[in-house]
């Protein structure tokens, strides 16, 4: 299922010291702190506010099987929340450097190259909180 894709994205982000520093964390941060800043799915366990950001939510979007019935043309999304728009864009830029035109690999999962499909600001509706959405295309063999 798509959970292995989310796990692969999470693993790559979590292992990058520069990315984690942008979230205000280091490699020695406890798992609970990482889970509060790097969220698998759309529903964080904590309320998003100016006190809990920066935060990145990782989730999949609808995809389809390609001409080759073994290859799934998937999409995954990163929603970045930060106090300033510039900070959200900086986090998204570091993710771009990690993902665009690269392969994902994690515990037996191997993708084809990822490509940036779309990025834009979005309104959060929360005072003093900015959002930036990034969508990547990624093909992989879905079992």
Image (cartoon, grey):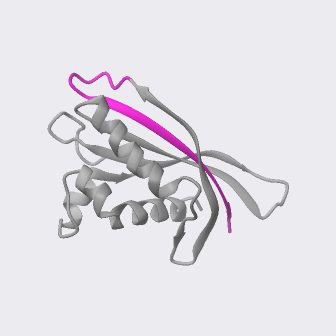
- Quarter of the image for the C terminus: give it: bottom right
Q: Residue at x 42, y 27 (%)?
A: 121
Nearer to me, 90 or 14: 90
Quick check: 51 left or right of 131?
Answer: left
Q: Please state, as top left, top right, bottom left or bottom right, where the N terminus lies in the image.
A: bottom right
Residue 85 locus on image (x, y percent): 31, 29
- Tell me: 120 left or right of 36: right
Q: Which residues are magenta?
A: 123-143
Picture quadrant where residue 26 is located: bottom left
Q: Does the image show residue 40? A: yes
Can residue 130 be found in the magenta stretch? Answer: yes
Q: Position of residue 32 (x, y in %)?
A: 21, 61
Q: Is residue 52 above or below residue 2?
A: above
- Residue 121: within the magenta? no
Task: Give the farthest residue toward the left.
Answer: 51
Instruction: Kindly tell me whether residue 43 is visible in this rendering.
Output: no
């Amino acid at each position: 299922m798509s959970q292995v894709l989310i796990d692969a994205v999470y693993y790559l982000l979590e292992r990058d010291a520069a990315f984690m520093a942008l979230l205000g964390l280091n490699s020695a941060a406890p798992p609970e702190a990482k889970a509060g800043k790097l969220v698998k799915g759309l529903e964080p366990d904590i309320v998003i506010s100016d006190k809990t950001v920066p935060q990145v939510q990782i989730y999949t979007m609808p995809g389809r099987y390609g001409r080759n019935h073994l290859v799934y043309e998937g999409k995954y999304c990163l929603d970045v929340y930060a106090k300033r728009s510039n900070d959200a864009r900086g986090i998204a830029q570091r993710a771009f450097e990690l993902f665009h035109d690269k392969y994902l690999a994690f515990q037996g999962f191997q993708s084809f190259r990822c490509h940036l499909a779309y990025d834009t600001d979005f309104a959060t509706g929360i005072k003093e909180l900015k959002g930036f959405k990034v969508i990547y295309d990624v093909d992989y063999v879905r079992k």
